[in-house]
Image (tube, rainbow, N blue to C red):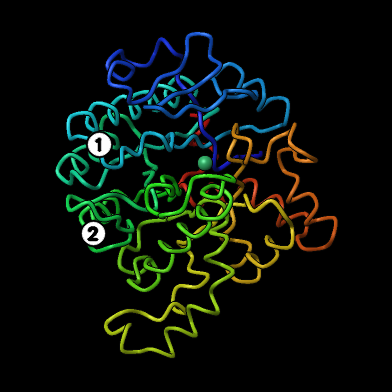
Amino acid sequence: MRINGHGHILPEPFQIPKFMKEKKLFWIDEDKRFMRQGDWSRPINSTGFFIKEKIEWMNQHNIDHGVMLCLSQLYCNGWEKQDCFDAIRFQNDFNASIQSEYPKKFTCGFVVQPLYMDQALKEISRCVNELGLKLLCLPTHFLNARGEWLSVAEVDLDPIFELANEYGLAVQIHPYDGEKMIALKNEYWRFHLVWMMAQCADTLHLFALRDLPNKYPNLRTSFAHGGMLGIANYGRRIQGFDGRPDIFKKLEDPRKTLGHKNLYFDTLVHDSHTLELLKKRVGVSQIIMGLDDPFPLGEIEGVGTSYPGRVLDYAREIGVLTEQEEKDIWHKNVLDWLGVKKEDFIS
Ligand SMILES: [Zn+2]
């Protein structure tokens, strides 16, 4: 059985409530050629954005099951309270409808916005108890009431992690909104190609320093895109921790959570050598399949030599992974992260 642990799915244009377009929060053109938000737009130009094509695409590539996260455009960073409430509810209801209509095919995540804590906590309970969702999607950073960008591993989010820990949820942390946090001109796709790597690393840095995997032992957290820079800069973080103890008082040594059994990383690193580093640092058991479909930065066909599973296939060819390790990344490890058994999808 092959399970993709990182994918996204769009609602049909008619499924998106009218207010979303009227307020320019998020909408899709009737002809399905663009998705839009405020003045931003992005072409919808590959297969697998919508449910029917997504299932066909999965069948084509022998993908039996897909984990669908929230849409990054709907993290709602900096939105008004009511807009945030309405949009998040829409997103979570939509994802729940996919999961309940196609339980064999999809496990879906739900999202909350940490700025409105009461709302976020109530939404977690609603999603778990009423919608049957068990995967919490969080952005790497959010905008607080003082207009500061904070990592979601900051103490401000402890109530969210406490409740998620009670429910024993899986968590996925994904970067977005880099162009709003970093004062560089938005060109060369730099916020996707460079800064997203740094955003994940920044939250992983705090996650380790605050010892969150041990503080909340029932949570299993996956970092998107292999945590990339957060894996490459491990040595530097150790050097800094040892070299400036004055900065890290009351914080934990990052060595303590390296390779922790509840910290996962997906395979979306685009090359087998980076994957090898990830394996050496955290161990194969902590790596899950992540295709990030249907986006052009995902491991999808039609972009260079890419196709779903390419990095793993190549890693096996050059001896970085064994056949069994490749199988585990596609199956067992994803189930462990989600905290479910294969039978749970079928019943
Ligand atoms: Zn993604």
Left or right side of 144 for 306: right
Q: Secondary structure at mark 1?
A: loop
What residue occupies the far front of the structure in this picture? 185
Q: Which mark is residue 158?
A: 2
Tell me residue 206's x, y (percent): 37, 68
Looking at the image, tell me whether mark 2 or mark 1 is earlier in sequence order: 1
Up-down: is 329 above or below 153?
above
Q: Nearer the viewer, mark 2 or mark 1?
A: 1
Counting other residues with Cα less than 10 Å from the Cα at mark 1, is it few (<14), some (14-19), or many (20 or more)?
Answer: some
Mark 2 and mark 1: span between their CA atoms?
Answer: 21 Å
What residue occupies the far left of the structure in this picture? 118
Q: Nearer the viewer, residue 186 or 44?
A: 186
Q: Amino acid at mark 2?
A: Asp
The residue drawn where x is 71% and y is 31% is 62
Tell me residue 47's x, y (percent): 64, 23
The residue drawn where x is 58% and y is 40% is 292
Counting other residues with Cα less than 10 Å from the Cα at mark 2, is it few (<14), some (14-19), or many (20 or more)?
Answer: some
Quadrant that contains the N terminus: top right
Tell me residue 343's x, y (percent): 52, 37
Q: Secondary structure at mark 2?
A: helix
Q: Find out whether the residues at labels 2 and 1 contact each other: C-beta distance under 8 Å.
A: no
Q: Tally the numbered discs.
A: 2
Up-down: is 219 above or below 96?
below
The residue drawn where x is 54% and y is 44% is 187
Give the quarter of the image for residue 254.
bottom left
Q: Amino acid at mark 1?
A: Trp
Read off the residue under disc 1: 79
Q: Nearer the viewer, residue 345 or 334?
A: 334
Disc 2 residue lies near ligand 1 with CB under 8 A: no
Tell me residue 130's x, y (percent): 26, 30
